[in-house]
Image: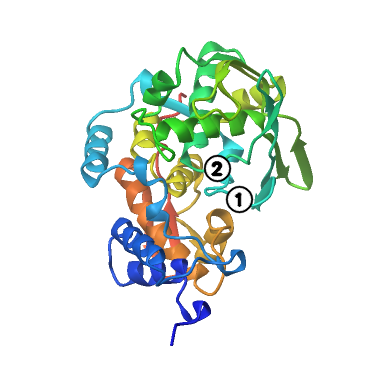
Amino acid sequence: MAQDKHDKPTREAYLQQLIEKGLDPRMAKEVVSQLVEAGQLREDAPSERTYPTSEVMEEESARPSRQALLAASKRISMNGPAGNDLAFMHTILCQVGLPRRAIEGTSFQRVCDGVGIHIQAGSLFDGEGWVEHPVPYGAMPRLVLAHLNTQALRQRSPIVDVGPSASAFLRTLGFEPAGGDRGPYTMFKRQVQALAACRITMGYSVGDTAYTVKGDLIDEFEAWTRPSGNGAGRDLWPEKIAFTQRYYDSLTQHAVPLDLRALHALKGSALALDLYAMLAERLHRVNGKSVLLHWVSLRAQFGHDYHGEHGPRNFKRDFKVALKKVLAVYPKARVSVVKTGIALRPSPPPIPYRG
């Protein structure tokens, strides 16, 4: 008798089982895809996706090899940062980041320890009509924003000349401009347009007072247009991006310096980039011997997309993987994993602050 489709395990459940048994995530994904095509697994209903696939599978085309990570660690350990190794992120986005994966709907918000962001998806005009874009997500918009922040601060202007081509811009972010639907070139074009179109509102509290920084992050998106290669709409490549004056003024006062070499080494994991930015912003402010961050609070800050019965366990596993990568490129960070979470001890920032 034929097996009822509901008796078959789902793609996500079986994938998780393979990973937990020790199979390499990339190989596990290939095995699962073959089983789905053969009809031996069923696709997940939206409500069944109670937790994300492993963080180590995120943005596979950009994942650095272990050798590349070790090489970056050696360079950072042996040589202090030069002027062109500087990058900057707004302090609020060091504490609460963009979504790491595509989300359903057009709105996203996060709040943690008195700091929050609210992101609303938007649209761009392509010369012929309005094109709706999703909420930006993943490592790419984080790296793009760090680059744009850095250029704006260096030029002392909210207006940034992006450059002549997407390929040249991608190389400044540490990517080779490979094509394909999931290649860096395609993902970059999608995410830079989503970032330019969205509206980001930031909030923070000081004592009993709450502040809201409202408005678009980007005030103007000046782009060349051309027919897309697939005949659907038009491609946009930005010639110039202008931050809003309010965001730029806030950035000049609340920019956190990061090591660009570390960002390039971590470009395959949005979780690792978020964790690196948080530690860069926080470790040098730790008072006393240490500060303990419990798993519950860490999940509230970094694991908003880990749901369901296995959510806490999956988050803890992926967090530890990301932390190992971060500590490799932030060698002076004094962070240790303990049973109840992680312990932070006073550490110098990755980029020394000028006295």
**Which residue is found at the position 64% from the left and 36% from the top?**
133
Mark 1 and mark 2: Cα distance apart in space: 8 Å
Instruction: Give the farthest residue toward the right.
Output: 209
| Spot occupied by residue 304 in the image (x, y as percentages of width and height) | 58, 57
Kind of residue indicated by mark 1: Ile
The residue where tag 2 is placed is 137
Q: Which mark is residue 181?
A: none
Using the rendered view, name the quadrant where residue 125 is placed. top right
User: On the image, which quarter does residue 232 sit in?
Assistant: top right
Residue at 57 percent of width and 45 percent of height = 95
Relative image position of residue 266 (x, y in whole percent) = 37, 41
Q: Secondary structure at mark 1?
A: loop
Q: Residue at x 24, y 32 (%)?
A: 75
For marks 1 and 2, the one nearer the N-term is 1
Quadrant position of residue 329: top left
- Report the coloring of the rendering: rainbow
Of 108 and 194, nearer the camera is 194
Circle 1 crowding by C-alpha within 10 Å: few under 14, some 14–19, many from 20? some
Label 2: which secondary element? loop
The residue pinned by badge 1 equals 103
Note whether residue 114 is visible.
Answer: no
The residue lying toward the viewer, choosing from 49 and 343, is 49
Quadrant of the frame with the N terminus: bottom left
Residue 144 visible in the shown view: yes
Q: In the displayed structure, does residue 59 sit left or right of residue 127?
A: left
Residue 142, percent from left and from top? 51, 36
Residue at the extreme front: 1
Q: Residues within 10 Å of mark 2 (few under 14, many from 20)?
A: some
Q: Residue at x 49, y 45 (%)?
A: 274
Label 2 is placed on what type of residue?
Tyr
Do the residues bearing badges 1 and 2 touch, measured as CB atoms within 8 Å? yes
What is the x, y in percent for residue 172? 39, 23
